[in-house]
Amino acid sequence: MTESLPRKIIHIDMDAFYASVEQRDDPSLKGQPVAVGSPNARGVVAAASYEARAFGVRSALPSVTALRRCPQLVFVRPRFDVYKSVSRQIHGVFAEFTPIIQPLSLDEAYLDVTANLAGLPTAWATAKAIRRRIFQETGLTASAGISYNKFLAKLASDHRKPNGQFAVTPDMGAAWVETLPVARFHGVGPVTAAKMERLGIRTGADLRNCSMEFLRANFGSSAGWYHAIARGEDDRPVNPDRVRKSSGSETTFNRDLIEAAEIEGGVLEMAADVWRWCETAGAFGRTVTVKVKYSDFQQITRSQTLSLPVDSHDGLRAAALGLIRSVLPAVKGIRLVGVTVSNFAAREEGALPLFG
């Protein structure tokens, strides 16, 4: 590829992956609202079928809330060994078309097909061929986004879901971004989206109209990224060697918290989020870190490095609770807590790569 030619990048995203595997393997679940997870009071939805999503059931939703929204919801216990096996099949299909693959999780990846192994003339045709081969190999559907950079390809893959594909060409990229809500942008999480809303930034066009000085003043080191993506620009290559070094989750509370039970509850929710990733990826770390941000924006962290990797949800819960309790009772209101696992153990031979 010469510098004058745009990259051809595909973002493949499996459709409701865990739930679709369960519906494939148990025909009685087809057409039913399915949630992968536990229905108990402390359970959380790990994945939801499209039938369940129609009722507002989403991943990370508490199970009791999911059942309230959809009383007929069918819960299925997760089978991560099966999901990993299917993911290996999918990544085998990717390798038929390109060696330049950057997995993001078990069910999605970036592919650089500028020079594809199948010799197909367009990225559009390549994406269709990949999706067809995935269905032949697994019986599952995938959606694809095609563009000249990773940011736009990821946005595009969500545009024709499920079982569709959408292309953003160089002549339409910047204008297309302007029409979209910023909450859809990769790298703009719920907290940042809410801040942008307060600042009057609701669409890509609003973001593009912001000066770099304004963005720096309000978003610090992220200003350059927001300035670029508002123009459909992203120079990051598809990197097959980028190993994930940690997994973390954090939440900003609706109000500043003082009560220990509420603060601990928030930490346990974040630990559950992190554990789902660790279990899915087969990645278990020795270092657990809890982050606290107070009402005055002072930020502290507490970490513990164990002699062995944390290989159970209960182990992670216990470590996170011990760390948050080291700063309780709260001397002032707490607005945010987070949990991170790092210092991963060496991967077993044949295990899935730990990409972020």
Image (spheres, rainbow, N blue to C red):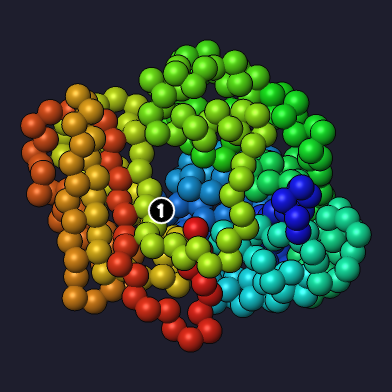
Q: Is residue 330 left or right of residue 18?
A: left
Asked which secondary structure carries label 1, the reply is helix
Count of labels shown?
1
Residue in the picture at 69% in, 41% down: 152
Q: Is residue 269 above or below residue 253?
A: below
Q: Amino acid at mark 1?
A: Asp
In percent of width and height, residue 126 lies at 85, 61
Q: Is residue 219 left or right of residue 298?
A: right
Residue in the picture at 58% in, 61% down: 239
Residue in the picture at 28% in, 35% down: 336
Determine if residue 239 is in view. yes
Foreground residue among 66 and 101:
101
Q: Is residue 183 left or right of residue 7?
A: left
In percent of width and height, residue 10 lies at 73, 54
In percent of width and height, residue 109 lies at 64, 60
Foreground residue among 316 and 132:
132
Question: In the orientation shown, which residue stands out farthest toward the bottom?
Answer: 349
In percent of width and height, residue 275 lies at 38, 61
Q: Quadrant of residue 166?
A: top right
Mark 1 Cα within 10 Å, few/some/many (few <14, many 20+)? many
Question: In the orientation shown, which residue stands out farthest toward the top?
Answer: 200
- Locate the N terminus and report the quarter of the image it occupies: bottom right
Residue in the picture at 41% in, 24% down: 216
Q: Is residue 175 above or below residue 63?
A: above
Q: Which residue is mark 1?
A: 273
Determine if residue 78 is in view. no
